[in-house]
């Protein structure tokens, strides 16, 4: 199983999109490069693919595949983005270049589920949504176990360089159909704190509110009750989701504005909305970023985070097109229309955007370049949507190696992805947003048991003594392999 399967991981609805011919070619080429590199490194392919060398092999092939994909195939053109990696066969150099356990990584967009909670019976469509975003080689008897609390703690805090995370949730109307009801999210936060020896904050929470279900005043009072617990770092809404497939606008004075006003009055200074990336039963008329950009002008002392940056898998990202009807361009147009300057109180996260675009470096360069120039270099936040797709570590490694070409910097005004800019995106921007002191946090966490376990796991992985690096759920028996082949979420030809 490749650490970074190319192409679409999920179609954003129920099941992953089928791999394209290009994806199959990239997959086959990655195996060839990996075979060769593993032979040179003197280790078997399975072990190689679980190392930083395996990630580097995938990135090398993404570079090559992007070169030959000029428009119409007429001529070869250089892609606007590429990966700078050591030779994949030099596993130690790849580890050195791509992993950085001492950096400050704040992942603002993570998930897990509680498989024993009532949502599994009450919300079958949500179950389908979650099943469509599992790690592709999930083999647990109950697949939801691959995205449960234990998998989350392992994949995010042990098998990756993540320092601090924010736990999110998917569309729900309350504890009866939420994959992580707020009380369980608090349970996860407490468990992380215990594992860390009770020290500094590693896990922040926001809570999904659906004000369009039931009585609005009751929903608003729920917000106040949750804010009073002291466990909340903000609220999150899905404006495109609601009863009978009907969404709402944040500008609507009968529903949207009262919600923001209440969040404001409860002291919340971070308000998040999912925009773009259409999910199940989404009301696409309410999935655009215009309303949240508009209300950012009315609540200047709050911060508005647009999850997914309005990115949409049904739209190819290129140079800014003010007439585009989907994707990141709709966000840029809204910022212009409402005269929001760069680095103001509108923020974006890269959850799923980076994971889906990283195998297409040209689109990835446009997406990142546009967000960084227009939303602002201090307003783009690292998010991975882990533990959907498995551990965030391969995504992190790819990001560290990514560059925007000099040509695209000149033609489109995109910034160079310097180490300083990457450090801002990977953690320092979010630290400012959530008022965490990154140095104090790192110091407080430096000696805690979780950091020690994280370091030990990284050490064992580097020595090849810990085979399950970021794919802890792969098939290990013939029976599991057969079940994996029959699984509806399978999209790769088995090795
Ligand atoms: Zn998400």
Image (tube, rainbow, N blue to C red):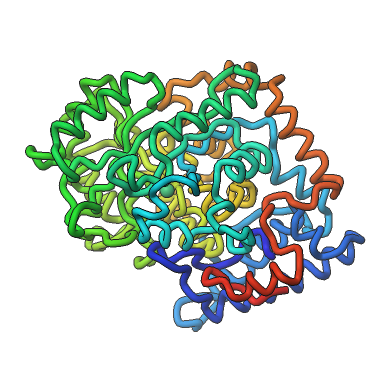
- Observer-nearest of 122 and 385: 122
Residue in the image at 35% along x and 66% along y: 315
Say above or below: 20 vs 220. below
Q: In this view, does 435 lie above or below 296?
A: above
Q: Which of 452 and 383 is in front in this view?
A: 452
In this picture, residue 106 sits left or right of residue 137: left
Q: Residue 77: where, in percent of width, then height? A: 53, 71
Query: Which quarter of the picture shows residue 142?
Result: bottom right
Q: Is residue 373 left or right of residue 25?
A: left
Q: Which of 493 and 426 is in front in this view?
A: 493
Image quadrant holding the C terminus, namely: bottom right
Q: Where residue 216 appears, x then y in whole percent?
A: 14, 36
Please say whether residue 297 is visible from this viewpoint.
no
Kindly identify the residue that appears in the image at 47 percent across and 68 percent down: 16
Quarter occupied by the N terminus: bottom right
Residue 434 percent location from the top left of the image = 42, 25
């Amino acid at each position: 199983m490749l650490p970074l399967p190319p192409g679409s991981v999920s179609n954003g609805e129920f099941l992953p999109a089928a791999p394209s011919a290009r994806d199959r070619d990239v997959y086959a080429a990655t195996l060839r490069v990996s075979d060769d590199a593993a032979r040179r490194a003197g280790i078997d392919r399975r072990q190689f693919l679980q190392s930083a060398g395996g990630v580097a092999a995938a990135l090398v092939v993404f570079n090559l595949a992007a070169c030959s994909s000029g428009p119409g195939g007429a001529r070869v053109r250089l892609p606007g983005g590429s990966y700078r990696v050591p030779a994949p066969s030099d596993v130690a150099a790849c580890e050195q270049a791509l992993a950085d356990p001492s950096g400050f990584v704040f992942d603002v967009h993570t998930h897990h589920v509680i498989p024993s909670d009532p949502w599994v019976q009450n919300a079958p469509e949500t179950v389908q949504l979650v099943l469509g975003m599992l790690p592709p080689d999930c083999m647990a008897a109950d697949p939801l176990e691959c995205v449960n609390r234990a998998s989350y703690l392992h994949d995010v805090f042990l098998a990756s360089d993540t320092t601090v995370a924010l736990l999110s949730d998917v569309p729900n109307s309350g504890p009866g159909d939420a994959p992580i009801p707020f009380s369980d999210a608090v349970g996860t936060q407490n468990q992380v704190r215990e594992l860390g020896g009770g020290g500094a904050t590693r896990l922040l929470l926001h809570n999904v509110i659906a004000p369009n279900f039931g009585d609005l005043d009751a929903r608003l009072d729920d917000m106040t009750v949750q804010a009073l617990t002291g466990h909340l770092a903000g609220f999150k809404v899905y404006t495109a989701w609601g009863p009978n497939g009907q969404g709402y606008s944040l500008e609507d004075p009968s529903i949207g504005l009262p919600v923001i006003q209440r969040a404001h009055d409860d002291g919340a200074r971070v308000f998040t909305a999912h925009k773009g990336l259409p999910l199940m039963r989404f009301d696409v008329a309410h999935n655009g970023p215009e309303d949240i950009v508009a209300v950012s002008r009315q609540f200047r002392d709050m911060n508005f985070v647009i999850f997914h940056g309005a990115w949409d898998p049904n739209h190819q990202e290129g140079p800014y097109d003010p007439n585009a009807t989907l994707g990141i361009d709709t966000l840029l147009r809204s910022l212009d229309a409402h005269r929001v300057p760069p680095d103001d109180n509108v923020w974006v996260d890269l959850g799923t955007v980076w994971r889906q675009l990283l195998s297409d470096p040209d689109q990835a360069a446009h997406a990142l370049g546009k967000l960084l120039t227009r939303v602002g270099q201090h307003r783009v936040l690292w998010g991975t949507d882990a533990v959907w797709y498995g551990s965030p570590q391969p995504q992190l490694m790819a990001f560290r190696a990514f560059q925007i070409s000099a040509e695209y910097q000149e033609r489109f005004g995109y910034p160079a992805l310097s180490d300083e800019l990457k450090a801002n995106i990977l953690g320092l921007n979010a630290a400012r947003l959530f008022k965490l002191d990154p140095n104090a946090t790192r110091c407080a966490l430096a000696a805690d048991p979780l950091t020690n376990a994280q370091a030990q796991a990284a050490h064992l992985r580097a020595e090849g003594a810990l085979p399950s690096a970021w794919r802890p759920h792969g098939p290990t028996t013939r029976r599991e392999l057969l079940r994996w082949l029959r699984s509806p979420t399978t999209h790769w030809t088995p090795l």
